[in-house]
Structures are given as C-alpha cells and as structure tokens.
Image: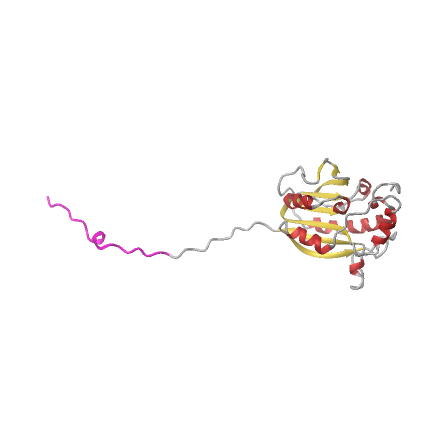
Amino acid sequence: MNSRSDSLFALPDVDALLRGELAGIAAHAARQPAGRALVLQACAANRAHAVDTRHLDAVRLYAERDVLRGDVVCAASALPWEDDAFRLVVVQHAADALGATDALADELARVLAPGGVLLWFGLNPWSPWLVWAHWRAHRGLPLPNTVPADFARRRLMRRQLAPVGLDYVGGCWPQNVVPAAVPRTRLLAPLSAAYQLTASKQRAVLTPLRPRPARRVAIRPQLATPSRRACA
C-alpha cells in the first residue's frame, strides 16, 4: 500500500484490521442462496484485499470523496440497481470514509433482498485507535466519520433492518498481525478498534385477515310465504 495515500484505510497499520474483518465474510455468503453480493470499501487501496463471497457474484465499490467508484461509478445516495438486488451487502468502513451516510443507509436497505444479510463495519469511536487516527490527522490525513455502534444500530432499525449481532474486531492499538475476531476479555471489548453489525432484511409476510362472523339476516314474513300461482 502507498503510505502517501490520502486515506487512513490505505495505511499498512490498518491492513491487518481490514483483513481480519474480511475473514468472516465467507461464512455469511455460504448461507445465502444464489445471487449477488455488494461490497463497499473505504478507499481504492482496499481492492487489493481478497473478498470471498463464495457462490455470490460480487460487485465491489470504494468511497472516493462523496462518490462511489469501482465496478460502477455512482452517488452513494443513488445506487444503480433495482430493489432487492443483493443477497449480501458488506460495508467495510465506507460509511467512515464518506460524510453524510443516511442516504447511503436508505439505499442499502432498498437493494438488500428480503432474507439477505448486511454486514456493517465501523471504527469504534471509544477505542484508543482514535488517538492514533488524530495523530495521523496532524500529518495531513482526514479523520474518519466515526459513529458509535448503538447509533449505527438505530440507523439500520429505522430502515426496517433487524440487527441480529454485534461483534468487536481488532485490538486496542494498530498492529501488524490479523487480530482475533473478538477480544478474550469482555472488559476490553468496547475498546476494540472496530465493530461489526450484522442485520437482516425481513421477508414481507402476508397477514391473514381475521374472518368476519356470519351475519344472520332476518327474513320478512311476506317474503317467506310461497307465491300464489294462478290456476289454469
């Protein structure tokens, strides 16, 4: 990677964290039926990382200022795919690299298929990593747009995406080896470098209507009497 990149996520110090996050993608992809996957990453340098989406055909994009580039070029607020297009959506710090992400969350909820899975990776603003990030910012790198995990979870819930898991990834400080997926001590987990939110899009279920009770209709006497027929 080029250490002169204008993105924090292109630095060698962050490389091990990113590779550790991607290691768990294959297990989620394997549980999905045939279809497509969408992978959004923080910068162009991240495209060098292999992403194992198994049998799902992957479309890969990366954030560059306020647009997404890669296999297509588009605005984050206007993804060029139909509704329910992807079985798996991976957001690996793309939201950290972009500015306003509410419109991106709307679009991701739209293109995720019912029954599909969204994996949202974000830098943990409570981690000592952010001390290191501020130090890098003094050397010319922009600070990431970090949000707490609970804030990101509520953001997804407002889009009708049901969170099914929260995991912490990485150690408390940049390191050159791939970190464990979850720290060994629960006490240190909230200080980890990043978090992974797993959410699903619920299938639309037809709600059966409650049967209405049969109504008895009173028959008027004049209608109940047999009609008179003229005699021949």
- Which residue is at the front of the view, 137 or 81? 137
Outermost residue toward the front?
A: 138
**Residue 34 in view (yes/no):** no
Is 195 covered by the magenta stretch?
A: no
The colour scheme applied to this rendered structure is: secondary structure
Outermost residue toward the top?
A: 73
Quadrant containing the N terminus in the rendered view: top right
Rendered position, 138 above or below 68: below
Residue 77 position in % (x across, y down)? 68, 40
Q: Is residue 206 left or right of residue 131?
A: left
Q: Is residue 223 left or right of residue 28?
A: left
User: Residue drawn 81% across and 49% down?
Assistant: 18
Majority secondary structure of the magenta segment?
Answer: loop
- Which residue is at the front of the view, 139 or 201? 139
Quadrant containing the C terminus in the rendered view: top left
Residue 61 position in % (x across, y down)? 74, 40
Magenta stretch, residue numbers = 214-232
User: Residue drawn 85% across and 53% down?
Assistant: 131
Residue 118 position in % (x across, y down)? 69, 49
User: Residue drawn 63% across and 39% down?
Assistant: 82
The quarter of the displayed image where residue 100 is located: top right
**Residue 13 in view (yes/no):** yes
